[in-house]
Image (spheres, rainbow, N blue to C red):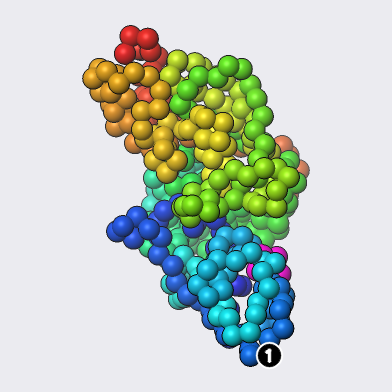
Amino acid sequence: MNSGLEDIDLFDEDLLLEGEAEDEDGLQEEHEHWRIVADKGQSPMRIDKFLMDHLGDTSRNRIQKAAEAGCIRVDGKPVKSNYKVKPLQVVTLVLDRPKRDWEIVPEDIPLNIVYEDDDLLVIDKPAGMVVHPGCGNYSGTLVNALAWHMKDTPSFDPNDPTVGLVHRIDKDTSGLLVIAKTPEAKTHLCHQFFVKSTKRQYNALVWGNFSEDEGRIEGNIGRNPKDRLQMAVFPPDSEIGKPAVTHYRVLERFGHVTLVECVLETGRTHQIRVHMKHIGHVLFNDERYGGQEILRGNMSATYKAFIHNCFAVCPRQALHARTLGFVHPRTGQEMFFTSDIPADMAALLEKWRKIKTEEV
């Protein structure tokens, strides 16, 4: 039986949370991939062990990841990996995409290639481009564009998970990504991300002013139990979510909003967005986390008009993956890339620079 769990490395929280799988009511579609009813004589058993015994073609780590993401259900309700299965309970695996095989099809989509050699590419992704196909978006993605770009390279198979994307950024986040052309390059680059030796800096415009010039945010990040489309922060010593650390530094103050630089120690889903919300500084125009509301300033008609004009100028969360540094997987050379602030964010910042906050 095909459990669907062998695809857990391709299913990850970035895909589930980007929102491409939402239905017309804004709710995420869910699809059952696997189901089993526990025997009448089933003795209480941890669900990760239960699934290992019944599937046999996946790892406990993948099962635990699926449980953490809310994809393992018992009698229709999400359970943790330490839940004990009882007689006649119905155990299911639910994912955000239909149970179907799909192939990445090359599409002639322009790419902003910052660097390329025989081992890797560095791409400057525009806001609005989905990185990887998922439920509801099987075309028009960065991966489809890469498949076209590499179509004349026999050694590159876009459907082979041992090559391609090394990391991801959200659909509406712009900036730099590295892509591996060979399995050796991907293994080497993935290891650098795992041991946190890569260098990544983001620029973000957030609501509110800071009392300090720099700071550190630490808190586990996991799925919000009240809203599956959001992530949330949990205490570092809790068993909920994954450890996450973000360092930030103020670059420019505008009174009601602030431009900050964020450096990641970890790379969790929506990390900057949810960490900033956690300390009271939601990203400007981040609709998923409430940043599309007027969170600072007065409610005068002039100020409201100014803010809504800002939203129109940059109609997405104001977040840009500005720098990316890593060691070349073959040559050992240290490589470092910088992406200019994109036009929409640049125009947004210029609007704030031109206006004195106390006068609007």
At x 30% / y 21%, what residue is drawn?
299
When the figure is inspected, residue 74 is found, relative to residue 352, above or below; the finding is below
Q: Which residues are magenta?
A: 59-64
Q: Nearer the viewer, residue 34 or 333?
A: 34
Query: Given the current orientation, which residue lies at the most extreme left position?
Result: 301
When the figure is inspected, residue 204 is found, relative to residue 360, above or below; the finding is below
Q: Nearer the viewer, residue 230 or 132?
A: 230
The quadrant holding residue 243 is: top right
At x 65% / y 25%, what residue is drawn?
215
Around disc 1, counting alpha carbons within 10 Å, would you say few (fewer than 14), some (14 to 19), or many (20 or more)? few
Q: Does 123 appear in magenta?
A: no
Residue 177, x across and y down, in percent: 55, 44
Residue 63, x across and y down, in percent: 65, 68
Q: Going by the image, does 156 lie left or right of 63?
A: left
SS assignment for the magenta stretch, majority = helix
Residue 357, x across and y down, in percent: 38, 13
Q: Amino acid at mark 1?
A: Gly
Q: Is residue 165 visible?
A: yes
At x 34% / y 55%, what residue is drawn?
26
Q: Going by the image, does 266 lie left or right of 168?
A: right
Q: Does 61 appear in magenta?
A: yes
The residue singled out by tag 1 in the image is 41
Q: Give the secondary structure at mark 1.
A: loop
Residue 67, x across and y down, in percent: 61, 65
The quadrant holding residue 249 is: top right
Query: Given the current orientation, which residue lies at the most extreme bottom position?
Result: 40
Q: Going by the image, does 240 lie left or right of 225?
A: right
Q: Is residue 192 visible?
A: no
Classify the position of the C terminus by image quarter: top left
